[in-house]
Image: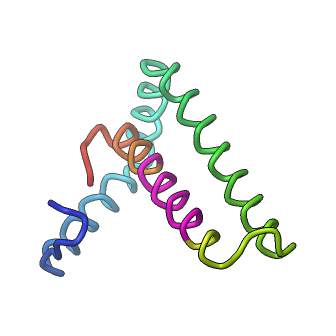
Amino acid sequence: MGKHETRDPKEIRESLDDLVDKLNQDTDSSESWNESVASNKEEWESLKIRIGERQRELKQLVTDKKAGLIGIDEFNEKYHRLQDELTELETTVYNMRLGTHVE
């Protein structure tokens, strides 16, 4: 599905409900999480580092805007790019966490 295509709200709701159900599986979910981290340790570490870097970049971007070091157009462009990157990284974490492939 392309970035600008719309999905049926009912389909989105059902997909989100499925994700919530998977996240609410306390004991099994915790064990699954530990197994996923153990079996993909290098990937988890890489994801943590990349997410931390993007979060620091985002914080610096806001600081630079408040200090007047960058204009609104540059801020908006970089802000949206960083948010998109963080969303992709977080989706990767959810997929690894749930053992699924969610877009």
Quadrant (top left/top right/bottom left/bottom right) for the C terminus = bottom left
Report the coloring of the rendering.
Answer: rainbow
As for residue 62 lying within the magenta part, the answer is no
Residue 51, position in %: x, y? 59, 44
Total tally of numbered discs in the picture: 0
Q: Which residues are magenta?
A: 77-89
Q: Is residue 55 left or right of residue 13?
A: right
Q: Is residue 13 left or right of residue 93?
A: left
Residue at point 18% right, 70% down? 14
Decide whether the magenta segment is chiefly helix, strand or loop.
helix
Residue at point 45% right, 35% down? 33
The one nearer the camera, 44 or 67, is 67
The one nearer the camera, 87 or 4, is 4
Residue 32, position in %: x, y? 39, 33
As for residue 87 lying within the magenta part, the answer is yes
Residue 85, position in %: x, y? 48, 52
Q: Is residue 21 left or right of residue 12?
A: right
Residue 74, position in %: x, y? 62, 69
- Compared to residue 20, the image places residue 92 above or below, namely above
Residue at point 31% right, 52% down? 22
Residue at point 67% right, 59% down? 58
Quadrant (top left/top right/bottom left/bottom right) for the N terminus = bottom left
Which quarter of the picture shows residue 100? Answer: top left
